[in-house]
Image: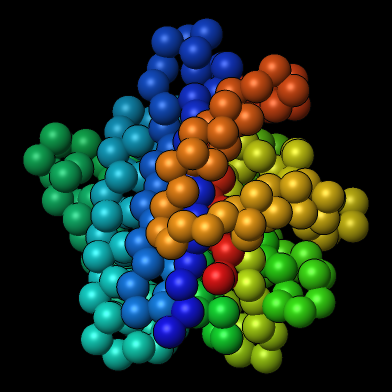
Amino acid sequence: MPDWTWAAASRRGTAHVTTGDGLQDAYRVLTVAGFIIAIACDGAGSTRYGRLGAVIATRVLSRRAAKWVGRHRRLPSPVMMEMWVAEVRLAIFVHADRRGCAMGAFAATLVLAISNGISTLTAHVGDGAVVAQCAGFNEIIALSWPESGQYASTTFFLTDDAVRLRIGIVTDIAVDRVAVLTDGLERLALDFAGKAAHAPFFRSIFGPVASSICVGRNQRLSAQLADFLSSDSVNARTDDDKTLVVAALR
């Protein structure tokens, strides 16, 4: 059974530091039965409970995914994924009803990847991205690309009336590195002109994780990743919250 090593971090953007707002991103990573389950959600900063919406989504989806792959040892179907997202929306509705507000107050994006290296599923609502390295070829590919809204700096959310859930299943390409990121890192990690992942960026972050001797979370690399996300060089390129999950198959 394959083992995964991973590192992850989430840091507040300088714009939120200036306004005194808290971190709006949330993430969850689990390894179960040879699968990596990586989820990152970006709560809309313009909403009151965006962070809570992101937390609800990561918790519900990680639990459902872990239970599924632990029991069945295979990827969930697109229909199953849609059911889990519907469950997220129901949980958000309950929280919104208790507070007497609309679901939109909990608006959050979704970026999810489940992989055992041989087969990979992505589930995506809004911006952010899933990027992987092809096993044996070192080619960096984007498995799921950001989707923007009709207007500049807008996107889609789990709480939209008609949720735009994009599900991808890859079975013809084996991968041994996977990264999940929120939109705060898009300018550094993605080449929008060529609609491709920026390979030098991902090789630089995949390398240390792939060289790690531990199984599961590497705390030292996670701390270094957090320092990187808070660095002046990163903050000069983006003022948004930033979340990055990096996993390597051992």
Residue 223 x/y as whole percent = 49, 33
Instruction: Report the number of numbered marks.
Output: 0
Front in this rendered view, residue 183 or 152: 183
Going 20% across and 55% down the picture, which residue do you hit?
Answer: 91
Going 67% across and 91% down the picture, which residue do you hit?
Answer: 172
User: In the displayed image of the protein, which residue is found farthest to the front?
Assistant: 213
User: In the displayed image of the protein, which residue is found farthest to the right?
Assistant: 194
Q: Quadrant of residue 250?
A: bottom right
Front in this rendered view, residue 103 or 78: 78
Residue 23 to residue 109: above or below: above
Q: Quadrant of residue 31?
A: bottom left
- Is residue 163 in view from this perspective? no
Front in this rendered view, residue 30 or 121: 30
- Can you say which quadrant of the picture contains the N terminus? bottom left
Q: In the displayed structure, does residue 235 sit left or right of residue 243? A: right
Front in this rendered view, residue 76 or 33: 33
Going 30% across and 33% down the picture, which residue do you hit?
Answer: 49
Residue 122 to residue 18: above or below: below
Colouring of the image: rainbow
Q: In the displayed structure, does residue 131 sit left or right of residue 139? A: left
Going 62% across and 36% down the picture, which residue do you hit?
Answer: 184
Residue 197 x/y as whole percent = 78, 57
